[in-house]
Image (cartoon, helix red, strand yellow):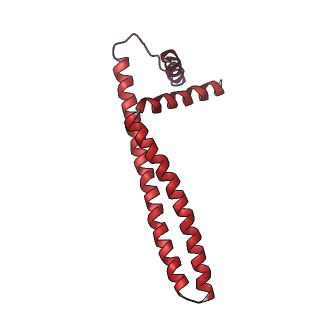
């Protein structure tokens, strides 16, 4: 696996026109620092997306209340508005659930098994580099 990682990093460095001296003593600490920064970045972006999911739930709650208010009135036009609010509410709940669950699992992965995140990212880069050639 380490040979594959070195190949990916060499190919990536080659794309940027950088030569990496793997015998240098400061390469490993720099790679560790880079991986730590990447995991922190993934946690930060997951938190931002989690906030977006929570905002979807907040708007869904407001749409549900509006739909309930519209159904309280017996006017035909308000009944139609109530149905629209319920549909919007359902869509927002589905979107919020998908976003929240995905990001919660990303955060758990980053905290418990950050190596998986790094390996997946390196595999993606490697497969993209192979596709370009």
Q: What's drawn in magenta, residue-wise?
A: 11-26
> Where residue 91 sits: x, y (%)?
57, 63
Q: Is residue 133 left or right of residue 105?
A: right
> Where residue 1 sits: x, y (%)?
50, 18
Q: How many numbered callouts? A: 0
What's the magenta bit mostly, secondary-structure-wise? loop
Residue at the extreme top of the image, as rendered: 23
Which picture quadrant has residue 73? bottom right
Which picture quadrant has residue 45? top left
Magenta includes 21?
A: yes
In this rendered view, identify the residue nearer to me: 18 or 59: 59
> Where residue 59 sits: x, y (%)?
47, 67
In this rendered view, identify the residue nearer to me: 32 or 69: 69
> Where residue 104 sits: x, y (%)?
43, 47
Eyeballing the image, is 103 above or below 114? below
For the point 53% across and 22% down, which residue is it?
Answer: 8
Magenta includes 118?
A: no
For the point 56% across and 65% down, which residue is it?
Answer: 90
Image quadrant holding the C terminus, namely top right
For the point 46% across and 47% down, which residue is it?
Answer: 103
Eyeballing the image, is 96 above or below 18? below
Eyeballing the image, is 20 above or below 46? above
């Amino acid at each position: 696996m380490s040979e594959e990682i070195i190949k990916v990093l060499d190919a990536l460095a080659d794309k940027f026109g950088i030569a990496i001296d793997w015998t240098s003593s400061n390469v490993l600490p720099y790679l560790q620092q880079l991986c730590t920064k990447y995991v922190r970045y993934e946690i930060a972006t997951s938190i931002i997306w989690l906030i977006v999911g929570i905002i979807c739930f907040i708007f869904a709650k407001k749409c549900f209340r509006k739909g309930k208010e519209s159904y309280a009135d017996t006017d035909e036009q308000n009944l139609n508005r109530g149905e629209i609010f319920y549909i919007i509410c359902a869509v927002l709940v589905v979107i919020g659930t998908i976003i929240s669950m995905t990001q919660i699992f990303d955060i758990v992965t980053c905290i418990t098994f950050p190596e998986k995140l790094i390996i997946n990212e390196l595999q993606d880069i490697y497969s993209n580099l192979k596709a370009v050639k």
